[in-house]
Structures are given as C-alpha cells and as structure tokens.
C-alpha cells in the first residue's frame, strides 16, 4: 500500500470539502497569518486545540524546530489570539508526559516526568494554559490521551506496519522483544472524549486520562491481528531499541469515567478489526 494512502492527510482533504467546515491555512507565527485568522476567532466560544506538526524521521535540529519553534511557540501565539474570545479550551495532550513511572496504573495524580521533546512540549502547553485559566478564570480541560490507533494512522507507527505486513503474508517486524505494553485507544473513542468535553459544563480546570485502562503487549496485538485475518505469522524481532521504548504503561481512566462520563466503545479486537477493514478497503481501491 502506498504511503500516500496512510496518515491523516487524505481524510483532512475530505473534511475540508464539507460545507460545515471553514478551513483556514495560515502561519500564526507571522503577523500576516495572525491577521488572517483573528476575525474568524471572534465568534468562537469553545476551542479544541489539537496541536501537532509531524516531523517524521528527523534529526535533533529538525525536532527542535518542529517541537519548540512550531508546536510550542505556534500554540502560544494561537492561544493568545483566541483567549480573548473563548470561554473554554480543550487541549489534547498525551500520556507521554508521565514518562517512566514506578507505580501503575498511572493516574492524573502522578507527577509528570517527560523524557522527549514531544512530551516536554505537550507539558509546556498544558502549563501555559493553566496559567491563563487561573488568571482569566476560564474553563480548561486537558485530555492526556494514551496510544491512539485506527484508520488513517501514520505509516511509521507500529500497528499499520503490523497490519500491512500480515496482509502481505509477511512476518511483522517488532523492535525489541515485543513484550512492551501500551494502553491502546481507538481514534473514535478519542473523538468521543473530545465531544463529551465540548458538551461539559466544568467551570474550572480539569485533567483527564483518556485511555482504556488496559494494556496489551505488541506480541498480543500481532496475535490479535493474525486471528482477525485467519493467519499465523510470527513476528521477527529486532533487538537494540532504547529502554524507554521497551517500557510498559497502563493508565487509570476512573476519573474520566466518573466526571466526564467517558467509556470507550472499542476494545482492542473491535478497534483492530475496524482498522484492518479500512486497510483492506483502501488496498482494493488502490489495486
């Protein structure tokens, strides 16, 4: 399957065509870009800030430029523009901000321990939004989202590579021993959490883990994909990844269930089946 068929850009093109969407392309780090978007923010009351510039494979300097100059500074500029008008901000952060933790499952009470530029940037934006929320007494909801998967996932992520390999009757490649565990959450469940946040009436700051509360190893994911497709292709393990990538995580989602009424609709089987179905449909269209 061509790389062009993977990732969120094909879906974004479909969304832009919708009459319900007003798409604006601009650079908020420039005065021209800020002037272009400012008039459109005046009627916005709820801001959902997703924040991401994907760099793909990049060296340290490129990563610094993407994470600090674009993601962090771009977020600050955009939030500053919008904050005069909005009443509520919803920010999709990441459970990556917790970093390595001894005690699991990880709750919202765990102290952050970011260990990458990505997680440092996410936590910095969280903290900036908290300062604004306290100063201007506006609602803030931070969603720390676990490992997202689903249709239109980027091609360099683990699950798309596993699915693509098994569909082609090839052994999926796993970096490490495959016993790394992640709390995988399906993309539609993340959208559900955002929607519930939009509908909520919290008047103060809220922090939620958006997760399933269950963890699965990469080997378990591969076995599940095999079962869905009726195959039995064993993974090929490549040893030599960092200890960070080999760590395991599971996140406590009790708070989001209690206060946000968030319950995931997709288990691992249902989510993987949906992603595989999308792969198969896309493959048929391409061929």
Image (cartoon, rainbow, N blue to C red):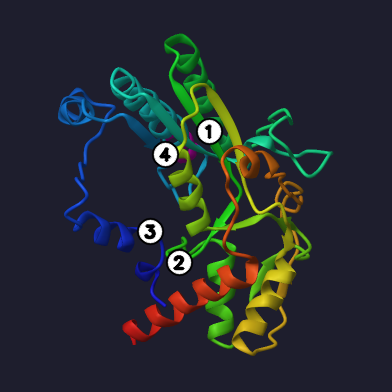
Which numbered disc covers residue 151? 2
Residue matched to label 1: 142
Question: Left or right of 31: which side holds 126?
Answer: right
Q: Which mark is residue 8?
A: 3
Task: Read off the magenta span.
Answer: 61-65
Q: Is residue 69 visible?
A: yes
Within-10-Å neighbours for mark 4: few <14, some 14–19, many 20+ = some
Q: Main secondary structure of the magenta part?
A: helix
Gap between marks 3 and 2, in whole Å?
9 Å
Q: Quadrant for the C terminus, please.
A: bottom left
Q: Residue furthest right?
A: 102
Which of the 4 quarters of the picture holds residue 88? top left
Q: How far apart are labels 3 and 4 at the CA level?
A: 22 Å
- What's the residue at 68%, 33% (across, down)? 108
Residue in the foreground of this view, choosing between 128 and 247: 128
> Is residue 51 something one can see in this rendering?
no
Question: Would residue 90 appear left or right of 77 to someone viewing this image?
Answer: right
Where is mark 4, residue-wise? Answer: 198
Q: Residues within 10 Å of mark 1 (few under 14, many from 20)?
A: many
**In this rendering, is residue 129 above or below 50?**
above
In this rendering, position of residue 108 left or right of residue 88: right
Does residue 205 lie above or below 150 as drawn? above
């Amino acid at each position: 399957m061509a790389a062009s068929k993977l990732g969120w850009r094909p879906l974004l093109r479909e969304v832009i065509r919708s009459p319900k969407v007003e798409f604006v392309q601009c650079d908020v780090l420039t005065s021209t870009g800020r002037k272009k978007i400012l008039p459109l923010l005046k009627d916005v009351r709820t801001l959902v800030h997703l924040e991401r510039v994907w760099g793909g494979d990049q060296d340290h300097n490129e990563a610094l430029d993407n994470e600090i100059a674009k993601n962090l500074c771009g977020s600050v500029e955009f939030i500053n523009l919008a904050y005069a008008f909005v009443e509520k901000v919803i920010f999709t952060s990441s459970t990556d901000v917790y970093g390595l933790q001894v005690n699991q499952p990880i709750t919202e009470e765990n102290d952050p321990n970011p260990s990458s530029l990505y997680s440092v940037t996410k936590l910095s934006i969280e903290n900036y939004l908290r300062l604004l929320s306290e100063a201007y007494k506006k609602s803030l909801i931070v969603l720390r989202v676990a490992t997202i998967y689903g249709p239109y996932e980027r091609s360099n992520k683990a699950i798309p590579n596993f699915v693509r390999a098994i569909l082609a009757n090839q052994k999926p490649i796993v970096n490490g021993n495959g016993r790394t565990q992640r709390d995988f959450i399906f993309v539609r469940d993340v959208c559900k959490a955002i929607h519930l946040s939009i509908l909520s009436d919290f008047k103060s700051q809220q922090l939620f883990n958006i997760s399933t509360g269950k963890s699965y190893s990469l080997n378990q994911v591969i076995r599940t994909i095999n079962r869905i497709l009726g195959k039995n292709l064993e993974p090929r393990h490549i040893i030599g990844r960092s200890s960070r990538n080999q760590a395991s995580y599971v996140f406590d989602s009790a708070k989001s269930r209690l206060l946000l009424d968030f319950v995931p609709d997709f288990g691992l089987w249902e989510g993987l089946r949906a992603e595989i179905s999308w792969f198969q449909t896309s493959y048929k269209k391409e061929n």
